[in-house]
Amino acid sequence: MQLNDAQRLDWLRLIRSEGIGPRTFRTLINRFGGAGAALEALPGITGRSGKRVVPPTRAQAEAEMAAAAHLDARFVALGEADYPRLLQAADSAPPLIAVRGEPAILNRPGIAIVGSRNASAAGLGFTERLARGLGEAGLVVVSGLARGIDARAHKAALIPGTVAVLAGGHDRIYPANHADLVDAILEAGGAIVAEMAMGWEPRGRDFPRRNRIISGLAYGTIVVEAARRSGSLITARFALEQGREVFAVPGSPLDPRAEGTNDLIRQGATLVAEVAHVVDAIAPLLERGAFSQDTGLLARDRPDLADATLFWDELDGDGVILPTTDDGPDALEPADDRSRLIGYLSPTPIGTDELARAAGLSVRVVQTTLLELELDGRIERHGSGTVSLVG
C-alpha cells in the first residue's frame, strides 16, 4: 500500500481527531473503507462523552505536515513499505508515525534497552557495554531518549545504529538538553520516531504510549535498572502483550533500582549478564522471521459503530496505569557534588574513573567527596580501587 498526498492528509486529520486512537482509527477505516469517507461520517458520530467528534481542518493538517517537512520528518502510514514491520504486527500500532532520519533502519532487527533515569554508574557502564555489543552483533538499539539508561544506550549504539522514540512532537525534544543527542543519532544514520503531533509537549501519560512503540519496534526488551513502580516495567509489559522477549539485568537486592528487574527475572524474564544471552535468545526469532506478518489495513469484519464506547482514545483513557517513578518529566539532577555522587553509587562496586565519568565530575572532586562519604560511613572500599554504597 502507498498513500497519495490527499490520502495521507486524510489519515492525519482522522488520527488527530480528539478521542480517536489506533484501534478506533482501524474500526473507522474498516467500516467506511477509507479515511476520507470516515471523515465525512464523523459529524454523525458521538464519542463516549457524548460530544461530537470534530477533526482538525484541512488547513491545520497541512500546517502540521509543513512543520514536519521543515524538520525533514515525513509521515509513514501503517501498511506502507517504510512502516516498521515489527511495529505493524503489534496491537495498537499507530496508524501514522513521523520519521526523521533513515527509515530503512526501522526494518532492521531491533532490540530495546530501557531503564532508570536515575541510574547508577554501574548500571550505566553495563548498559554501554551491552548496547555496543548488541550493535556489533547487528542489532539496532531502540530506546526512549530519556536521561540515564536510555541516553547511554543510544550513545553506545550510535555507529551501528539506534532509534529514539519521542513522547512528544518532533519539535518538542524531551528532555530539551538531548537535542544534541538527536542530532548525533541522525548524523550517524539512525532515526527518530514520533506518534504525537508537532508542537505536542509530552505529558506524564504520553510516556506509556511511547513505551508500547519502543517495545513494538524490537524483538525483545531489556530492562537494566527499574524500581517496582518504574515506567520501564510498563515497556516490559507491552513487550509481553506483543509476544516479544523480555530480558532483565539482575542487581543487588539492597538497591531499590534493582527491585523491578529482579522481580522480572523471578517472573520468568531472561536473565542478562552478557551480550550472548540476548543474541542467543532472539536468534531463532530472526531465523524464522517472527512478527513480520502483514497485518493489512482492512479487516474482514466490520464492527457495528452503534456502540459509542468504541470512540475513545484507548491509549489515553482511564485504563492507562501511570508509573510512580522513571516515567514522566525528568527530575532535576542534584546541584551539589555530594548528592549527585550518591545518586550514582549503588551496592555494586564501581571504579573511581567510571564513577567520575557517570557523574560528570573530575576524578579529584570524586576522590575528595568519596573520602567525606567514607568518614560518614556511607561507602565501603573494595579491591582495585572500587567503592560501593553502604545500606
Image (cartoon, grey):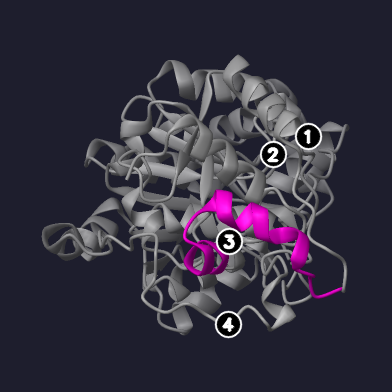
Give the residue at x 33% y 60%: 296
As drawn, the residue found furthest toward the left would be: 287
Question: In the image, what residue type sits under mark 1?
Answer: Thr
What's under tag 4, amino acid-wise?
Asp
Give the structural element (helix, strand or loop) at label 2: loop
Q: Which residues are magenta?
A: 27-49
Residue 208 in sight here: yes
| Mark 1 neighbour class, 10 Å CA radius: few under 14, some 14 to 19, many 20 or more | some
Residue 313 included in the magenta stretch of the image: no
Question: Disc 1 designates what residue?
Answer: 369
Image quarter (top left, top right, bottom left or bottom right) of the N terminus: top left
Q: CA distance from mark 3 to mark 1?
A: 56 Å
Q: Nearer the viewer, mark 3 or mark 1?
A: 3
The C terminus, quarter of image: bottom right
Instruction: Give the secondary structure at mark 4.
Output: loop
* Numbered disc 3: secondary structure: helix
Cβ atoms under marks 3 and 4 closer than 8 Å = no
Query: Mark 3: which amino acid?
Result: Phe
- Answer few, some or many: residues within 10 Å of disc 2's Cα (few below 14, many 20 plus, some between 14 and 19): many
Picture quarter containing residue 230?
bottom right
Q: Which residue is mark 4?
A: 304
Q: Amino acid at mark 2?
A: Ala
Q: Considering only vertical position in the picture, is 31 above or below 207?
A: below
Label 1, secondary structure: give it. helix
| Badge 4 density bin: few <14, some 14–19, many ≥20, Cα 10 Å | few
Q: Is residue 276 left or right of residue 93?
A: left
Q: Which mark is residue 25?
A: 3
Q: CA distance from mark 3 to mark 2?
A: 16 Å
The x, y position of residue 362, in whole percent, is: 68, 20
Residue 69's x, y, as percent?
A: 58, 19
Give the side of residue 19 with respect to residue 350, left or right. right
Q: CA distance from mark 2 to mark 4?
A: 29 Å
